Amino acid sequence: MNLQVVAEKAGVSVATVSRVVNNRTGVSEDKVTRIRAAIKELGFVPKTRIPRSVPSVAPDGVKYGNVLILVVGTGHLSATELFVRQLEPICFGLSEKGFSPVVSMGATSLNQMPPVAQKRLIDGVVLFGEVEQEFLDFFEGIPLLWMTSHQEGSNAFVLPGNREIGQLGAEYCRNENCRFVVAVSSVLGAKVYESRHRTFIEAAESFGLECSLLLGSEADSIEHSVSAVIEKEIDLIKKADAIFFPSDRITAFAYPALCRAGIFKKSKVPVVISCGGEKNYLSGLDPRPVSIDMGAELIGQQAVEQIVWRMRHPTQKRQFSVVIHPELTE
């Protein structure tokens, strides 16, 4: 027996059952009651998950005790709740393991990094953003870990499940009996957003739903890009049963345009699905979107485990990609 059986019995999604089983918030009291009743009736016993961690070994590759956290081409990144929720467990986790995190924000050249990094007095590097070859050449021989999926030539990642995010959104639309869905996205930040909105469209089409991708193309800002495409395609959006946004930032910028067009005053309000789980963007939005939480804290925790392993095993050149599974909160 698995979560799917319980979900079908309770009339909810698998993600909702998972949240209740793992004692997480964000589920209505009615659904919690139904899920617990289904669990009791079915005699379901949840499996206990034991977190995987990197084996404790002698720090053969550790010389300085410093780990550089390099944030390149930040743009809006450093101001987002999602980034902070990843950065905090990285800094805390490294400190707990006896390392000193050295954070460098927005460096565009080597001489803008902290002196300890410029002198290569570091044992490892955690990278956010697209890194120029100048940095990669400079860090040759130092263990690297990427927190982004679109860095060419990189072979060690800890990432959110971007394709799973799109799949999860499409499954929710199917379960809500939606017939026509639209994905609203932007060419800005496209390498991250594209994986999500394309997977959403592909999965929705495989479920037999009618789909449309609305892609903002204005180059000055995401806000203008999204607002412009909504105003241009508002007649199409009014027909949608669900609207999918690949990030909470896009959702927040889209809501004013949707409200001006009266989208939420219709007799049947469309389902809105937003990705990220960033309360600073979602707070105050009415109606509240269905949120897909990317698991930022888990991403940060896994980043610590992986970079520490690489630092302590400098001669082992394994390639790996750790993907954190998203969860949907209704």
Image: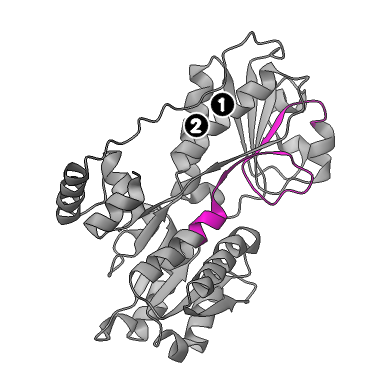
Element at label 1: helix
Q: How many labels does the image show?
A: 2
Magenta stretch: give its range: 139-166
Left or right relative to 227: residue 258: left
Residue drawn where x is 42% and y is 74% of the image: 243
Q: What residue type is labelled 2?
A: Gln
Residue 164 lies, with reference to residue 50, above or below; the image says below
Left or right: residue 283 versus residue 274 is: left
The quadrant holding residue 192 is bottom right
Q: Nearer the viewer, residue 212 or 3?
A: 3
For the N terminus, the quadrant is top left
> Quick check: is 49 in the magenta stretch?
no
Q: Locate residue 17 relative to residue 124 in the image: left or right.
A: left
Q: Are dots 1 and 2 in contact, CB under 8 Å?
A: yes
Instruction: Check the image and name the residue furthest to the bottom.
Output: 235
Structural crowding at the residue carrying mark 1, measured as other residues with C-alpha within 10 Å and reported as few (<14), some (14–19) or many (≥20): some
Q: In which quarter of the image is residue 168?
A: bottom left
Residue holding disc 1: 305
Give coordinates of residue 84: x percent, y percent: 47, 42
Position in image of residue 302 (x %, y %): 53, 32
The CA span between labels 1 and 2 is 7 Å
Image location (x, y in percent) of residue 199? 57, 64
Q: Give amino acid for label 1.
A: Glu
Q: Where is residue 154 in the image (x, y as percent from the top left)?
A: 75, 42
Identify the residue under disc 2: 301
